[in-house]
Image (cartoon, rainbow, N blue to C red):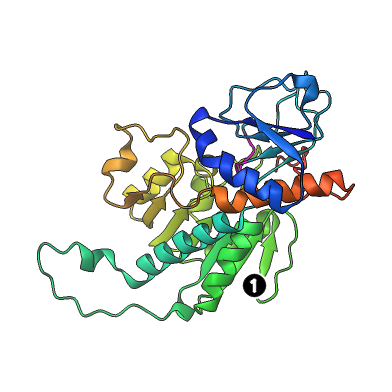
Amino acid sequence: MLTVLFAAAPALWDEYRPSLLAAFDAAGLKARLVTEAAPETVDYIVYAPSSSLQDFTPYTRCKAVLSLWAGVERVVDNATLTQPLCRMVDPALTEGMVEWVTGHTLRHHLGMDRHIVNPARLWDPTCPPLARERPVAMLGMGELGTACARALRALNFPVTGWSRSPKTVAGIPCLHGDDGLAEALRGAAIVVTLLPKTAETENLLNAARLSLLPEGAVILNPGRGAIIDDDALLAALDAGRIGHATLDVFRVEPLPQDHPYWSHPRVTVTPHIAADTRPASSSHVIAANIRRAEAGEPLLNQVDRRRGY
């Protein structure tokens, strides 16, 4: 009988417990799911970085730490974590992200805001260009970025992917490195950021790189708040160089009430809702990884500590 420790916010226990137990049963795993156990008896840890568990040293028997979050920047540098760490790649989370990115891309492409909020009752019959005339740069071509890029391409948007290392995605031209980033930004009317937060990506969109964008470009950030230099973005918005920014993630959450993003006319704030880990589907991801580990198979979505994701 395996012992699986659920180490996450207490409020999540009632939500996840039935889904995890059902997933373990479906995977043929004989496991007890607990919120407390002697560390030396724990085989696997189902984990959220908001957990009170921060010292992994006593968990000498633990074979893997399985994160409920897609982002692992809050735990990846924990020196006590010597066990394999797996990030969450949840099909439902991906589905939700595709919907958010597609919805807000179409919103800006079609200019929907000026019709939804039109107190002056202005009659402006200007039609938007076709999607094929509105280039999109997808910064980050991992699981989420690739899924969003494919969805936008299916709607006829010309999508260019960018990542720090070379990637090949059928039907999507992909660039990499500093020169590739500059090229992607220069040609983008809409920029979507779906990068992990690492030392290399923090403030990636700084003043110099924002200045490369065509005037009036739109930025969508459902990835990580630290990817964007906030002061540089606000300056570019004030100057009218950036047409609008729709932001779902921030350096401090909830976003402080006095933050200038709240009142800026060219900013839309959404409260970190672009995508969420859903118990019904993510529990099967957790169970599948435990089954794989017990069978001696490679873990799925194992984090590369050197790269930070």
Q: Residue at x 60, y 34 (%)?
A: 48
Q: Residue at x 60, y 65 (%)?
A: 147
Left or right: 112, with 133 as reference point: left
> Is residue 290 visible in this depiction of the protein?
yes
Q: Could you say which is closer to the camera, residue 12 or residue 97?
A: 12
Left or right: 188, with 268 as reference point: right
Relative to 18, is 51 above or below? Answer: above
**Kind of element beneath mark 1:** loop
Q: Quadrant of the C terminus?
A: top right
Is residue 71 rendered magenta in the image?
Answer: yes
Q: Main secondary structure of the magenta part?
A: loop
Residue 227 location (% of width, % of height): 54, 44
> Is residue 141 visible in this depiction of the protein?
no
Left or right: 118, with 29 as reference point: left
Residue 289 location (% of width, % of height): 76, 47
Left or right: 39, with 248 as reference point: right
In magenta, the rendered stretch is 68-73
Q: Residue furthest left?
A: 120
Q: Residue at x 61, y 50 (%)?
A: 282
Relative to 156, is 74 above or below? Answer: above
Name the residue tied to disc 1: 172
Instruction: Identify the amino acid type marked 1.
Output: Ile
Is residue 93 rendered magenta in the image?
Answer: no
Q: Residue at x 43, y 34 (%)?
A: 253
Residue 86 location (% of width, % of height): 72, 42
